[in-house]
């Protein structure tokens, strides 16, 4: 059953009071009950007639600075902070009701939930994934498994993440890993309209810190891992951990599935509230609810068994994606859906035997995830991957290393992001590859030469202190670095392009420079007479 959208300003205010906010509504000529809100928007440019405009303040501006444009677009009311109220009054007088709250970003979620009809049990069933690495891959795996279970019931699946937002086969380009709260609730409504029964969603630490998931309720949330990244936003690993931990609270999530392969996972499981399920994927004995055992190579990927310690149940499945970390990602997706099938709330959607059968027979983890360990050619082995932080680089390099042949890699680092990881990434590259080409990623507003210098510094230091023989070069622009990597490779060698994955343009000081690693690599390989795999570009 699709919920109709809409709430009056009066109803919305009552719901905010019930949710613990203390809204103050400044009056207009009409009574608050007569002003009907049919949608919500946080970006002034996306306001539509009848919307609640949520005016937040930030590093660049206050949403209320754009109030004249917002009213011209037909906004019916404004939700904002005390500073926003003053701005609205000065620029627009008493033309629309203004609801004042102290924490606008946090109140935006419950407000949008009231307007778009999101509740804890409304469709879709939400599966959230957080962690430093593996969110995109795990959500693709989740969607694929959910599809295998729900398609025979005539129901659809949704996806929200870095690469795309999708409702069934309909695709919307994604600008953020996790959109703003109002956009998320609008999306939940459109999912319901499209018969989407379950959705897999990436939850970035930015989204948690900026309260983008406010007003959402997760049936199951999964944790992959926590390693260094995003220290520009969080400052310390402790604060980064605390942001992620917010997802695993009873008030937000019914069942938390936590991968406990590292200390951060153990601590996350200990601090999570509500129903907590642990998963160990290293193949080593562990005191976890679910364990991965019997990992064996299967094509480029791996087959493995999931064992439930409590019941002794054993489920054999596999993934076609290379790398031990993809066993972890696949196992997490599998346990999240198995646990949803166990929860009494959703058993009508997810029959446990359907999930087990899908895992054993439908090969749900044999999909390609754009730019994640994407194999472009086999001779030389040529792979495009999104690894752009130290841990992901180590794991990606381990995954592609073969007993014979040289390993050639191209890396860069993004500008205006966590500068402390650059020397570490340079050092990892020269320690684990035979030939390293340092080039550009997304410089944003930073000088690309300085970013490369950060990587080179770490790389040169590691070569000197470790007495390494790695061949190190600096080549830009990136397409030239890719051509050089291919020129340096023989058929038995391996080429890894790291850092950009699915991305199709670089942001260079605000200018979009078209470049797709998969296409560049395909072209460079073909120009030298090598065969490439279909769908590589
Ligand atoms: C660090 C961060 O996440 N910042 C987000 C935050 O910015 P902010 O608090 O500084 O706000 P602001 O940009 O001043 O905007 C305030 C208000 O003015 C409006 N405004 C602002 C400027 C303008 O020119 N025009 C305009 O209308 C905005 O729409 C907003 O209503 O709130 C803004 C509005 O909601 C977001 O656009 C902005 O995301 C920026 C674009 C961003 O780059 N975020 C990235 C880092 C991010 O969130 N990434 C994660 C993934 C990270 C990962 O795992 O790699 C993600 O989930 O996507
Ligand atoms: N479970 C994992 N553990 C460590 N590294 C991983 C894991 N899964 C994937 N990776 C590596 O991290 C890279 C990014 O993977 P993915 O896009 O799935 O993660 P993500 O969390 O969505 O990343 P981002 O938030 O940066 O988009 C991959 O290309 C791979 O190199």
Image (cartoon, rainbow, N blue to C red):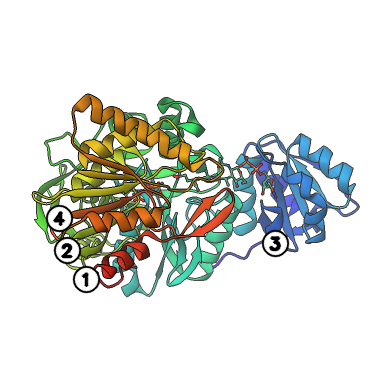
Whether the residue under disc 4 has CB within 8 Å of ligand 2: no
Which numbered disc, 3 or 1, marks the residue that appears first in the sequence? 3
Label drawn at residue 38: 3
Residue 338 appears at what percent x and percent y?
27, 54
Q: State yes or no: discs 4 and 3 in contact (Cβ < 8 Å).
A: no
Q: Distance between the Cα atoms at labels 1 and 4? A: 25 Å
Label drawn at residue 302: 4
Q: Nearer the viewer, residue 214 or 311?
A: 214
Which numbered disc, 2 or 1, marks the residue that appears first in the sequence? 2
- Are there few (<14), some (14-19), or many (20+) residues within 10 Å of tag 4? many
Q: State yes or no: discs 2 and 1 in contact (Cβ < 8 Å).
A: yes
Label drawn at residue 316: none
Q: What residue is at 64 percent from the left and 63 percent from the top?
A: 5
Label drawn at residue 379: 2
Q: Distance between the Cα atoms at labels 2 and 1? A: 8 Å
Which numbered disc, 4 or 3, marks the residue that appears first in the sequence? 3
- Are there few (<14), some (14-19), or many (20+) residues within 10 Å of tag 2? some
Along the horizontal axis of the image, is 388 left or right of 187? left
- Are there few (<14), some (14-19), or many (20+) residues within 10 Å of tag 3? many
Q: Is residue 483 above or below residue 156?
A: above
Residue 46 appears at what percent x and percent y?
68, 59
Which numbered disc, 1 or 4, marks the residue that appears first in the sequence? 4
Give the label, 1 or 4, closer to the camera: 1
Q: Which residue is label 1 attached to? A: 531
Give the label, 2 or 3, closer to the camera: 2
Q: Nearer the viewer, residue 531 or 460?
A: 460
Q: What residue is at 29 percent from the left and 69 percent from the top?
A: 527
Q: Distance between the Cα atoms at labels 4 and 3? A: 49 Å
Which numbered disc, 2 or 3, marks the residue that appears first in the sequence? 3
């Amino acid at each position: 059953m699709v919920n109709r959208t809409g709430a009056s300003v009066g109803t919305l205010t009552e719901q905010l009071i019930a949710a613990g906010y203390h809204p103050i509504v400044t009056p207009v000529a009409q009574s608050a009950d007569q002003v009907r809100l049919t949608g919500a928007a946080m970006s002034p440019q996306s306001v539509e007639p009848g919307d609640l405009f949520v005016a937040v303040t930030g590093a660049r501006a206050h949403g209320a600075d754009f109030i004249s444009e917002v009213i011209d677009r037909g906004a019916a009311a404004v939700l904002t902070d005390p500073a926003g109220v003053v701005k609205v009054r000065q620029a627009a007088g008493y033309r629309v009701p203004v609801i004042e709250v102290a924490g606008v970003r946090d109140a935006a979620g419950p407000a949008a939930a009231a307007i778009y009809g999101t509740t804890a049990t409304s469709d879709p069933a939400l599966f959230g994934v957080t962690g430093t690495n593996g969110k995109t891959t795990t959500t693709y795996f989740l969607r694929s498994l959910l599809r295998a279970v729900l398609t025979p019931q005539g129901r659809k699946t949704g996806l929200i993440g870095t690469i795309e937002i999708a409702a069934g086969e309909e695709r919307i380009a994604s600008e953020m890993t996790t959109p703003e709260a109002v956009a998320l609730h609008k999306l939940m409504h459109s999912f319901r309209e499209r018969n989407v029964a379950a959705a897999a969603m990436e939850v970035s630490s930015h989204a948690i810190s900026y309260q983008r998931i406010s007003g959402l309720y997760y049936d199951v949330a999964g944790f992959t891992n926590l390693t260094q990244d995003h220290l520009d936003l969080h400052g310390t690993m402790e604060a980064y951990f605390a942001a992620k931990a917010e997802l695993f609270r009873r008030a937000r999530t019914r069942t938390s599935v936590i991968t406990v392969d590292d200390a951060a996972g153990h601590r996350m499981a200990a601090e999570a509230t509500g129903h907590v399920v642990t998963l160990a994927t290293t193949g080593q004995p562990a005191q976890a609810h679910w364990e991965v055992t019997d990992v064996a190579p299967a094509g480029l990927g791996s087959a493995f068994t999931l064992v439930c310690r409590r019941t002794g149940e054993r489920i054999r499945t596999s993934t076609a994606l290379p790398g031990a970390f993809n066993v972890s990602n696949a196992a997490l997706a599998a346990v999240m859906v198995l646990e949803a099938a166990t929860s009494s709330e959703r058993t009508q959607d997810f029959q446990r035997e359907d999930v087990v059968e899908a895992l054993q027979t439908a090969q749900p983890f044999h999909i390609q995830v754009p730019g994640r360990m994407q194999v472009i050619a086999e001779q030389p082995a040529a792979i495009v991957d999104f690894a752009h932080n130290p841990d992901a680089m180590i794991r990606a390099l381990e995954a592609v290393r073969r007993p014979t042949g040289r390993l050639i890699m191209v890396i860069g680092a993004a500008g205006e992001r966590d500068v402390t990881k650059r020397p570490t990434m340079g050092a990892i590259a020269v320690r684990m590859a035979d030939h390293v080409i340092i080039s550009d990623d997304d410089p944003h507003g930073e000088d690309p030469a300085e970013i490369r210098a950060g990587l080179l510094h770490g790389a040169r230091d590691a070569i000197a202190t470790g007495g390494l023989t790695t061949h190190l070069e600096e080549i830009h622009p990136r397409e030239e670095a890719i051509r050089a990597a291919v020129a340096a490779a023989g058929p038995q060698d391996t080429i890894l392009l790291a850092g950009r994955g699915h991305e199709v343009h670089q942001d260079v000081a605000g200018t979009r420079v078209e470049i797709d690693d998969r296409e560049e690599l395909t072209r460079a390989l073909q120009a030298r007479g090598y065969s490439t795999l279909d769908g590589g570009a």
